Image (cartoon, grey):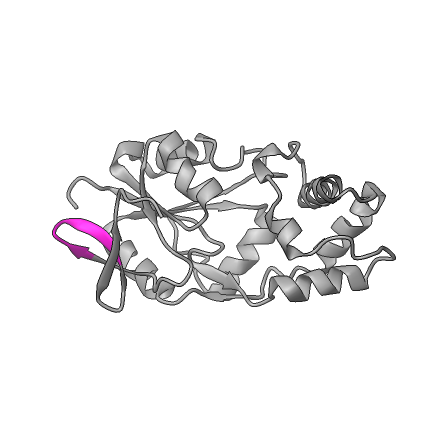
Amino acid sequence: MDNIDAVCFDLDGTLCVDDQSDEEIHEAVFDRVEAPEFFDLDDLYAVDYGALPEANSDREHHENVYRAIAQNVGADPSCAPALAEATLEVLDSTAVSFRDGAKEALEYTREKYAVGLITAGTEEAQLPKLETLGVQDAFDVTVCCGPGTGIKSKPDPEPFEIAVNELGVSLERSIYVGNRHDGDVVAPNVSGCRLLGCRRKTNLRIRIQSRRIVFHQCTKSLMSSDCPI
């Protein structure tokens, strides 16, 4: 790995997982508003987030999501502001845990490389997660991107360029570790850094083998640094 200077991680779903389930959040949101439950989680997952209008805050982003769902299912979008407000009340930024193997992977990586974090969300939403995990000082640079941050959302190259510039390395000598296809898998192809994809249930333990970083579940190599998910 003498050709790699830095490793940048995604946060949600890569280093940590939510302790609140989607089902719990969905139910709690509708408990707080006087509106019919006009969509289910499949409708939420079907939203094309890349097609949403640019938002200036988390609240506006959630409202855009609910308006998109209403349009997709043919429902009245007038309750979108109330749903967005309820979502902010329900979401607990501190309710996170390490993904299996993530703590060890991060510790190992810090011994070998410059380490960055590129995460979608405002500082108000994301930094409490780092404090809960006890890794608020683990990264040489932290870039929060997307609605309300003033930095474009992944997969735009901007957050990646900011991270590597602050780390003092090049995109070509960096690896990005992420789990989502729309923002994490596509993003390195756009920005020019390498990708290390991680499946949802993969144990996130990184080690060096034959001068390349690989993911392992137990002792089975799942993918190498340039493999897509």
Give the number of marks: 0
- Between 12 and 127, which is closer to the camera in this rendering? 12
Queried whether the magenta region covers residue 136, the answer comes back as no
Which is the main secondary structure of the residues drawn in magenta? strand
Q: Is 96 positioned to the left or the right of 197 in the image?
A: right
The structure residue drawn at horizontal position 37% and vertical position 36%, both measured from the top left corner, is 188
Q: Position of residue 96 (x, y in %)?
A: 53, 65
- For the view shown, which residue lies furthest in the front direction? 74
212, 5: nearer the viewer: 212
Question: Farthest residue in the right direction?
Answer: 34
Magenta segment, which residues? 208-215
Residue 199 vs residue 177, the one in the foreground: 199
Would residue 214 be counted in the magenta stretch?
yes
The percent coordinates of residue 48 (x first, y second) are 59, 39
Q: Quadrant of residue 34?
A: bottom right
Q: Position of residue 4 (x, y in %)?
A: 22, 42
Residue 195 position, x and y percent, is 32, 42
Q: Who's the residue at 73% across and 44% down the image?
A: 73
Q: Residue 204 appears in which quarter of the rendering?
A: bottom left
Between 111 and 160, the one lying in front of the other is 160
What residue is shown at x 42% (from left), y 55% (from top)?
Answer: 14
Q: Is residue 163 visible?
A: no
Note whether residue 99 is visible: yes
In the picture, measured across the screen, residue 225 lies left or right of residue 148, that is left
Q: Is residue 158 above or below residue 47?
A: above
* 141 relative to 138, above or below: above
Residue at 26% x, 69% y is 218
Location of residue 141 (image quadrant): top left
